Image: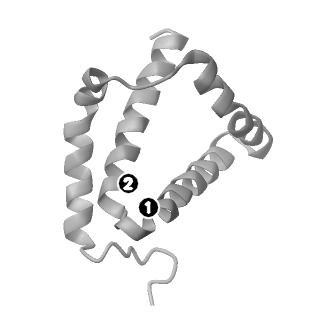
Amino acid sequence: MNHTAMLEHTSIVTYALLQELHRALAAPHEADDVVLGIIMGTAMFCDETIGPFRSRRLMREAPDIVLKADAHVTDEAAAIATPILRALCRHMEEAWPKRRIPLMNPG
């Protein structure tokens, strides 16, 4: 798979995953908190995967890249990944019905 195809494929799958995670985790009054958690989790993943300096540069440049490329995920592209990701999020909803996942403080 060439560089552009890999970037597009990864972007589509990630977008669909985040859409489903947001739907599964966000209560109406907590939508911003879920988005912040997604951003923080993405930053932590990038920091561990490619290091803090490259992560910072990519995070800083990401909004401009999206705007410059007019990047968006079409419904047709999202439809490919969505069923699998939706099933994962349904499982999460069933496992944690109160939407409170005790990861940091298992008590």
Q: Which disc, if any, is residue 9? A: none
The answer for how far apart the CA atoms under marks 2 and 1 are is: 8 Å
Mark 2 element type: helix
Please identify the quarter of the rendering in which residue 26 is found: bottom left
- Residue 53 in the image: x percent, y percent? 80, 41
Please, what secondary structure does the residue beneath circle 1 have?
helix
- State which quadrant residue 97 falls in: bottom left
Q: Which residue in the structure is indicated by mark 1?
A: 31
In this rendering, is residue 46 above or below 36?
above
Q: Residues within 10 Å of mark 1 (few under 14, many from 20)?
A: some
Position of residue 69 in the picture relative to residue 85 (left or right) = right
In this rendering, the count of numbered labels is 2
Residue holding disc 2 = 22
Q: Earlier in the sequence, mark 2 or mark 1?
A: 2
Q: Is residue 4 left or right of residue 22?
A: right
**Type of the residue with mark 2:** His
> Do the residues bearing badges 2 and 1 touch, measured as CB atoms within 8 Å?
yes
Q: Where's residue 5, x and y in %?
A: 46, 13
Label 1 is placed on what type of residue? Ala
In percent of the image, x 68 and y 48: which residue is there? 47
Residue farthest to the top, as pictured: 2
Residue 19 placed where, x, y %? 36, 45
Residue occupying image coordinates x 24% and y 27%: 80
Q: From the viewer's perspective, is residue 95 above or below residue 16?
A: below
Q: Residue at point 41% right, 70% down?
A: 29
Frontmost of labels 2 and 1 is 1
